[in-house]
Amino acid sequence: MNKSSRAPAAKFRRGRLSDLDALLAFERDFFGPDHQISRRSFRRFIVSPNCTLIVAESGGQVAGCALVLYRQGSKLARLYTIAIATAFQRRGHARRLLAAAEASARRRGCRAMRLEVREDDAGAIALYETSGFRLFGRRSRYYDGRIDALRFEKPLVDKSRRRPA
């Protein structure tokens, strides 16, 4: 049996309050005890007009999520987190979830998306680079006070579709 036949394809939808327990379990399993988003924060993110929480669901399970934050008056979106559960990795879900996050930001009128990633996370860096993100900076000792964060940005405006000035 190959990996793709083990679980149904993921469907992407907006996060809801009924997802809280699954999201918390997912965060704990994926990020460990030191880097979790709290129940209170997830509640706020789900109902806030200043963010979009996208849930990847497969076979009735939360397979992953992406959280995009927006600042009032800004045309920049920030990908705050994106993660796919281990059991659902290597099926293209992360790339599709990232595309869904970008589409959400475009619908809100954002011109670019930014993110930070651990400099030692080669898989995530490869995903971002092959998805059109470009390195523009670094934050020293951003993670755990010891690991640098690489800062990436991607324009969300299709230059060929811009209106003439």
Image: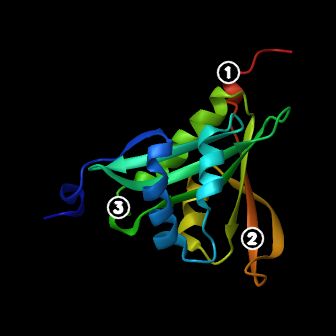
Q: CA distance from mark 3 to mark 2?
A: 25 Å
Asked if residue 96 shows in the view, the reply is: no
Q: Would you call the spot at circle 1 few (<14 residues within 10 Å), some (14-19), or many (20 or more)?
A: few
Which of the two labelled residues, at mark 1 and mark 3, occupies the earlier sequence position? 3
Q: Amino acid at mark 3?
A: Phe
Q: Which mark is residue 161?
A: 1
What secondary structure is found at the residue carrying circle 3? Answer: helix
Q: How is the image coloured?
A: rainbow
- Location of mark 2 (residue): 149
The N terminus lies in quadrant: bottom left
Nearest the eye: 19 or 101:
19
Location of residue 162 by image quarter:
top right
User: Horizontal placement of 64 versus 136: left or right?
Assistant: left
Residue 93, horizontal then vertical, whole percent: 41, 52
Of tags 1 and 2, the one toward the viewer is 2
Q: CA distance from mark 1 to mark 2?
A: 33 Å
User: Horizontal placement of 53 versus 6: left or right?
Assistant: right
Residue 155, horizontal then vertical, whole percent: 72, 40
Q: Amino acid at mark 2?
A: Ala
Of tags 1 and 3, the one toward the viewer is 3
User: Horizontal placement of 146 versus 120: left or right?
Assistant: right
- Location of mark 3 (residue): 88
Residue 53, horizontal then vertical, whole percent: 57, 44
What secondary structure is found at the residue carrying circle 2? Answer: strand
Q: Residue at x 65, y 31 (%)?
A: 106
What secondary structure is found at the residue carrying circle 1? Answer: helix
